[in-house]
Image: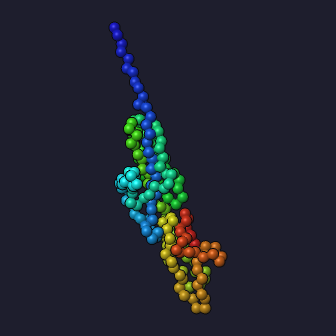
């Protein structure tokens, strides 16, 4: 009698890629560009690169990890100020190293409230995405007073609507 014993080889490790995509603002930086998460590939300076219309990869946000072929990836979302991670799924790791996990992050929205400081009628609050510019506004006119601007802390430093962007918390001006 002869007993044959099965012998097994492990499939080995293979690399996989994790890409982190942050939602972009529109051209005038007042709203999000959109929510299309479709990734296409374009040639840029002789190299094929992934492109997404409404999301962009931040510098250094792509990771190459390695694990056993046939197992599931272990991609992890990052904690990014002003952004919330969108749901994503792990994938089975392919031996050829082509497995890619794309993780998308949407911008959070925050509200700017305006305090007329006892003079006139304050403008309506503005809810905008993180990093966006606020629309310039002024309170209603008040006889005998000149409106100087909006201040975060009642100091002589005024909000610059062309440059100051929404932070990662509600704002009172």
Give the residue at the far right of this rendering.
155
Give the residue at the far front of this rendering.
46
Quadrant of the rendered image containing residue 56: bottom left
Position above or below: 85 against 172 = above
The picture places residue 110, in percent across and down from the top left corner, at 51, 66
Number of numbered tags placed on the structure image: 0
Position above or below: 45 against 68 = below
Residue at coordinates 61% horizontally, 73% vertically from top-left? 152
Q: Is residue 47 visible?
A: yes
Position above or below: 64 against 123 = above
Q: Is residue 86 visible?
A: no
The picture places residue 9, in percent across and down from the top left corner, at 41, 26
The colour scheme used to paint the residues is rainbow
Quadrant holding the C terminus: bottom right
Residue at coordinates 53% horizontally, 68% vertically from top-left? 166
Quadrant holding the N terminus: top left
Give the residue at the far bottom of this rendering.
144
The picture places residue 32, in percent across and down from the top left corner, at 43, 65
Residue at coordinates 43% horizontally, 67% vertically from top-left? 26
Residue at coordinates 49% horizontally, 62% vertically from top-left? 108
Give the residue at the far left of this rendering.
1
Position above or below: 154 against 25 = below
The picture places residue 92, in percent across and down from the top left corner, at 39, 40
């Amino acid at each position: 009698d002869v007993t044959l014993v099965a012998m097994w080889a492990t499939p080995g490790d293979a690399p996989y890629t994790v890409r982190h995509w942050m939602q972009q603002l529109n051209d005038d930086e007042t709203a999000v560009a959109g929510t299309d998460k479709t990734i296409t590939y374009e040639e840029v300076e002789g190299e094929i690169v992934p492109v997404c219309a409404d999301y962009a990869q931040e510098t250094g946000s792509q990771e190459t990890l390695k694990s056993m072929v046939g197992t599931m990836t272990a991609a992890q979302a990052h904690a990014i100020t002003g952004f919330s991670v969108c749901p994503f799924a792990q994938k089975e790791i392919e031996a050829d190293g082509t497995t890619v996990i794309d993780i998308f992050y949407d911008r959070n929205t925050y509200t700017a409230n305006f305090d007329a400081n006892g003079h006139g009628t304050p403008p309506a609050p503005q809810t905008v995405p993180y990093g966006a510019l606020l629309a310039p506004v002024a309170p209603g006119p008040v006889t005998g007073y000149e409106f100087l601007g909006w201040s975060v802390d009642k100091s002589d430093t005024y909000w610059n609507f062309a440059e100051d962007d929404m932070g990662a918390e509600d704002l009172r001006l």
